[in-house]
Image: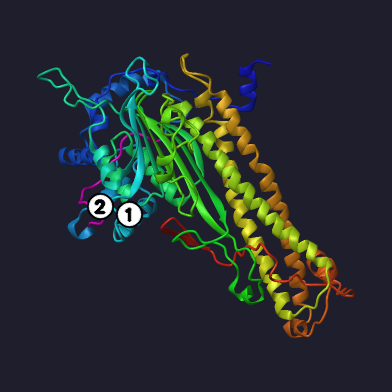
Amino acid sequence: MSIESETRRDFPHQSVQCYWPKRFTKRRPFNPDSENQTYLEYLQIEQYLGEGVSDDEEEDEAEEEEEDGASCEDDGSSNAPEDDVNEQSKDTDASNKMSDVRRFMRGMERDEDFLDDYDMVDEVAKFCEEGSQGPFRAREKHVAILDERNIAGTIVDKGGHCRTNSEPLTLEQLFDKLSRKRLRVESDSTNAFDDEESDAERRIVFISDLDSFTIQVIIKTASRTQAPALRDLFHKYLARKASMGVTISNGFPVFTLEFHMPYYVLGRSEMSRKLVFLSRSQDASKDSNPTDQHYWLHEAQISIVVTGVNNWVWTAYGFVDTYFGSKGTVEDYDKLKGRHWEREDPLSAGRLNGGEPIWTPREYFLRVVQSRIREVLKEWKRIVRTVTEEVEGSRGLAYSSSKITAQKLEFLERRNSQMAALSTQLIGGLSETILAWEGFRRTDANYFLFDEVPTAEPSLELSLNAIDKEFSKLKPGLRKLEQLKKELCDRREGLNAYLSLDGRAAARQLQDLTVLAIVFSPLLITSALFSATGVLPSPGIGKFIDAKSWDIEKGPWKVKEG
């Protein structure tokens, strides 16, 4: 069987074929203002001139390229607009002006990606407005890593021509770097470039623990072509959306490759300023052993977006959560050095050499996703293993012998319910992760397998197959969690049946009962068969996760209570 037919089998495509448009595979001329002018500046000009005015150059170019016949998905990634306002992103209706964040998030009504979903706009805007009222990040603290370079036509140096070489930057430095013109512009009078800096055609932006201040820096410096992708990125990152896909815009052609993956990280102590998600029940603490291990479940998110106008001019954004004490912060990557002392690529979790970059956006995106999904898989395996040990451990205790009190019986019932609720939460999260990949695999994966015209790019099928293999390893964990949930629900059914037999008063008089019957044989409970001496598991049984507290916070912002 040929490699191509094998790939088609592994990644089925719809009758309407998706492919990588040829317009992205050649250096077509375009107005550098589309990358040099910020989106907020563009909005001000458009509003001053009237929303009916548009960029003639862009429209003419778009008409010429319509015949290129893009792909099966053309939904939202052009330009976007809004209102006007000042620095702190919290101007109010009193002045009939919106904050920069709200202007950026909404866009102009005539744009294809105009956001009329006010909840999405509010989510990002309120996060920035509330965060701006808190303490400003220390001036010396590094908040981002920026890498800017270009391939300069021919490759003499594998690293290309660097403007910013994977430098860790403070908030002020990041704003300064991103505020500069990205592409040089030829002077009409001298025919010379007005800027001696190298073009920042390939730009990588890595931020750990994104906050309101870094969002505002990006919003104030983002170009017109990047605005649609960034709006979607901010929303999905803050809302913890699982998503993976490709978008090709109408009008001026822009591509966006996205990977958003929420997951959980298990820790043995509270490692951050955030609230814990799951901790030992306070009601049971008096019965617990001081040496018991306490687990804390933290929400985490990895968001990777690559957006650009062709295979040469593109930007990759990587937002990663590390607030719970994990490695992978800006400071951590600053200390990492690869061969010849080059910096490691932070978006790939240090698995790619930043000094010898991947120049094409699709290959870079897949290599980064391949690296990051391993991290997600590792955390899910750890969580499934811990929950399994907890459930199976309590199952084994049913064969020992001990006296039981009504208080302990009620504790077991409550704890069992909490573990069932936890398993439901985990199953939901893991299912969304797998579904996001399956949806991508059925359709958008073809953007990486098929080209409108043959190119010299390396085949990407090996990377796709490697990613598919990693995602397939999540499925056994999902099946295991579903089995554990069923067992926990069966236990709960039996305990509830017993507790309702003669009321709570009768339960308080109980001296001995068979936990094996209560927990594992609900039908015996309903038949009132309590003949053997049994045991209730002691509340202090080592590893324990309590799902009672669902006051879940992600990063410095509160998501919801459930």
51 to 21, vertically: above or below: below
Q: Quadrant of residue 531?
A: bottom right
Give percent across and percent down for residue 279: 57, 65
How packed mark 1 is, by other alpha carbons closer than 10 Å (few <14, some 14-19, many 20 or more), is many
Give percent across and percent down for residue 407: 70, 79
In front: label 2 or label 1: 1
Q: Is residue 17 visible?
A: no
Does the magenta segment cover residue 89? yes
Q: Quadrant of residue 199?
A: top left
Q: Residue at x 73, y 57 (%)?
A: 486
Which colour style is shown?
rainbow
Q: Amino acid at mark 2?
A: Ser
524 to 130, vertically: above or below: below
Report the side of 481 relative to 303 (left or right): right
Can you say which quadrant of the picture contains the N terminus? Answer: top right
Look at the image and give the residue range highlighted in magenta: 76-91
The residue that disc 1 covers is 128
Identify the element where label 2 is drawn.
Answer: loop
How packed mark 2 is, by other alpha carbons closer than 10 Å (few <14, some 14-19, many 20 or more), is many
Report the side of 220 relative to 500 (left or right): left
Q: Nearer the viewer, residue 342 or 287?
A: 342
Residue pushed farthest right? Answer: 531
Q: Amino acid at mark 1?
A: Cys
Give the distance between the C-alpha atoms of the residues marked 2 and 1, in whole angstroms.
Answer: 10 Å
Q: Main secondary structure of the magenta part?
A: loop
